[in-house]
Structures are given as structure tokens and as C-alpha cells.
Image: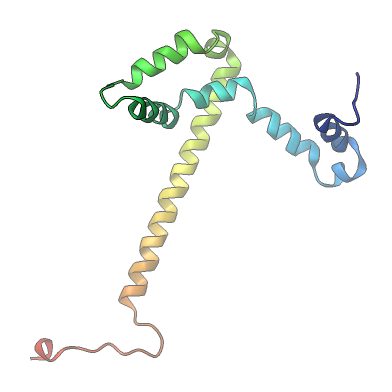
Amino acid sequence: MEIKQKNQSDLDKLFILCKEGLKKNAIDEFSQHRKIVNKYFLSTILRSDSVIDAIKREFRKIDLQIKIEDDEILGLLNNDVLKRELLDSLDTIEANDKYTKIVKKLEKKKIKDKESSVKYQAEKIISPSEGSEIKISEDIKE
């Protein structure tokens, strides 16, 4: 194994093994990074709905006349762009499962945050702020 002192990647790997790296759980961070940043996970992201929508937008920027379907883009990615290894391997299946779980978790969090924000705004509207009084107009009193 050859380590180059000026190569940042080599220095990062050495940091994992040094005393400071062990204190900061650098091994766990590196392991997590390797699990996510790889060709299988990237192929999963490239075939996701959000990326396909972005590709469609880019085609529309080029020519407004182009009507391209999601299936057509996905077919091009699967058949012409990505290697067969990235479509059929067990690692890809695992990456798909992880990505799906992450996306679902983020969607649930987004919905929960939205609901709590709406609830907070509703409470703010319903309850008067400190020092202010609710004034009822003369039309409503009668």
C-alpha cells in the first residue's frame, strides 16, 4: 500500500486510524460515507423520480416541442447509460431499499413539520398575543 503525503484522500484515511480520529468516531463516519457514496446508490438516485423530472425540465429548456415521458428517460438510463451491473446486482437492490426508506422517512418528517407549522399558525391566530385585547365590532354585538 502506497500512501502519498500530498494526497488528501490518503490523509483522510490515515486520520481515521489516528488518536483524534478514534475520539471523533471517524471510522463510523467513514463507514457510513462508504455505504452511501458508491456506484450502486448513485445509480438508484439517477433513476429516482426527482432526477427524472429534472432531466425532463432540461429537455424542455432545449426545445419546448419535446414531449418526453418518464418511462422513455428511464429506459434510456437503464439500457444505454448505466451498466448492467448497476441494474441487476444485489448491491443495487440493497441501495434501492435504503434509498426508498430514506425518502419515505424524509417525506413523513416533511408532513409532520408542515402539520406542526399549520397547528402553530392556527394557535397564533386563535389566541391573542400578550397585551392585546380582542375587539368585537359594534355590528357583531347587536
Q: Residue 114: image x %, image y %?
A: 40, 55
Image quadrant occupied by the N terminus? top right
60 with respect to 11 (left or right): left
Vertically, is 135 above or below 52?
A: below
Task: Name which residue lies at 49% across and 43% down.
Answer: 106
Q: Residue 3: image x %, image y %?
A: 90, 25
67 with respect to 115 (left or right): left
Which residue is the extreme one toward the front? 62
Task: Name which residue lies at 88% across and 33% down.
Answer: 14
Task: Name which residue lies at 44% across and 55% down.
Answer: 113
Scheme by which the image is coloured? rainbow
Vertically, is 141 above or below 39?
A: below
94 with respect to 130 (left or right): right
Q: Quadrant of residue 90?
A: top right
Q: Residue 21: image x %, image y %?
A: 85, 42
Image quadrant occupied by the C terminus? bottom left
